């Protein structure tokens, strides 16, 4: 039975990755086509996100937290860029979103003494408390790091280079960072069914 489920899960993850990257790829293509006008790329980004989010929901059978929050900010900041015809709103969106995630996760530890990744990912991962704390600290710091990376790129490079960086820098960096957490997940798995063992 588990052998039958694994390929289906793998396909769902592939589709989810395509849905996450799709709007970014279309946005990058649009910024290259309309070099001096942010309105069409912003509109492409908004429409692609509005299509991707319900498909994500249909695939995952639930609203996944990170794509949903990211999509909300694409709609808000994309609409502001479109309305004011100013790319600055879309350029600062990753900074705002990453800082928001970093503050929420870090603030949960500092002020509430709770690793807030646990209620979000507790159904996917079964970790002991030290594992949740370490994972939350790491992701909080990573989000702040990615916010700084975004600031450096949009302030020092062209719009096209910044848009491309979302595909070739931000997305791969997030995937690599997530993979680097596997040893921690393996060490702190709470239960006999450790998938990383």
Image: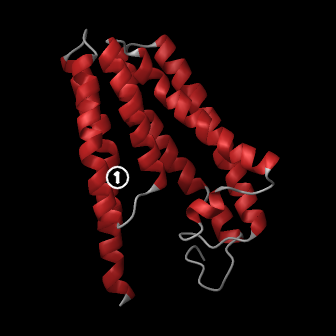
Image location of residue 188, percent across then percent down: 71, 70
Q: Mark 1: few, some, or many residues within 10 Å (few <14, many ≥20)?
A: few
* Residue in front for this viewpoint, 13 or 103: 103
The N terminus lies in quadrant: bottom left
Query: In the visual, does 97 lie left or right of 102?
Result: left
Image height of 132 relative to 190, above or below:
above
Image coords of residue 173 (percent x, y): 50, 41
- Which of the pair 157/132 is nearer the observer? 132
Number of numbered markers? 1
Q: Which residue of the protein is positioned furthest toward the left in this rendering?
A: 33
Q: Quadrant of residue 192?
A: bottom right
> To which quarter of the image does residue 42 belong?
top left
Residue closest to the eye, 140 or 62:
62
Query: Left or right: where does residue 123 sit relative to residue 70?
Result: right
Task: Please say if 126 is above or below 149.
Answer: below
Q: Is residue 183 visible?
A: no
Instruction: Name which residue lies at 31% across and 12% down.
Output: 85
Answer with left or right where residue 162 lies relative to residue 38: right
- Name the residue: 23% across, 36% down: 47
Q: List the residue tagged with mark 1.
A: 17
Q: Is residue 103 above or below residue 138?
A: above
Residue extending furthest toward the bottom: 1
x 56%, y 36%: residue: 98
* Residue 167 x/y as whole percent: 37, 36
* Percent of width and height locating residue 37: 25, 12
Can the viewer see residue 108 in this picture?
yes
Task: Choose top left, top right, bottom left or bottom right for residue 38.
Answer: top left
In the rendered view of the protein, which quadrant contains the C terminus?
bottom right
Q: Residue at x 28, y 54 (%)?
A: 54
């Amino acid at each position: 039975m588990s052998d039958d489920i694994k390929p289906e899960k793998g396909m769902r993850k592939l589709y989810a990755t395509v849905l996450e990257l799709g709007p970014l790829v279309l946005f990058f293509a649009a910024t290259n086509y309309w070099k001096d006008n942010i309105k069409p790329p912003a509109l492409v980004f908004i429409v692609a996100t509005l299509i991707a989010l319900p498909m994500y929901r249909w695939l995952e059978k639930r609203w996944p937290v990170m794509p949903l929050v990211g999509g909300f900010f694409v709609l808000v900041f994309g609409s502001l860029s479109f309305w004011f015809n100013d790319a600055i709103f879309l350029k600062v969106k990753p900074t705002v979103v990453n800082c928001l995630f970093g503050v929420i996760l870090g603030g949960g530890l500092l002020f509430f003494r709770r690793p807030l990744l646990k209620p979000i990912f507790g159904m996917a991962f079964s970790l002991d408390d030290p594992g949740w704390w370490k994972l939350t600290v790491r992701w909080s710091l990573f989000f702040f790091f990615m916010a700084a990376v975004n600031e450096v790129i949009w302030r020092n490079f062209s719009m096209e280079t910044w848009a491309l960086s979302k595909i070739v820098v931000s997305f791969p960096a997030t995937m690599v960072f997530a993979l680097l957490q596997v040893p921690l997940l393996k060490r702190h798995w709470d239960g006999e069914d450790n998938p990383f063992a």
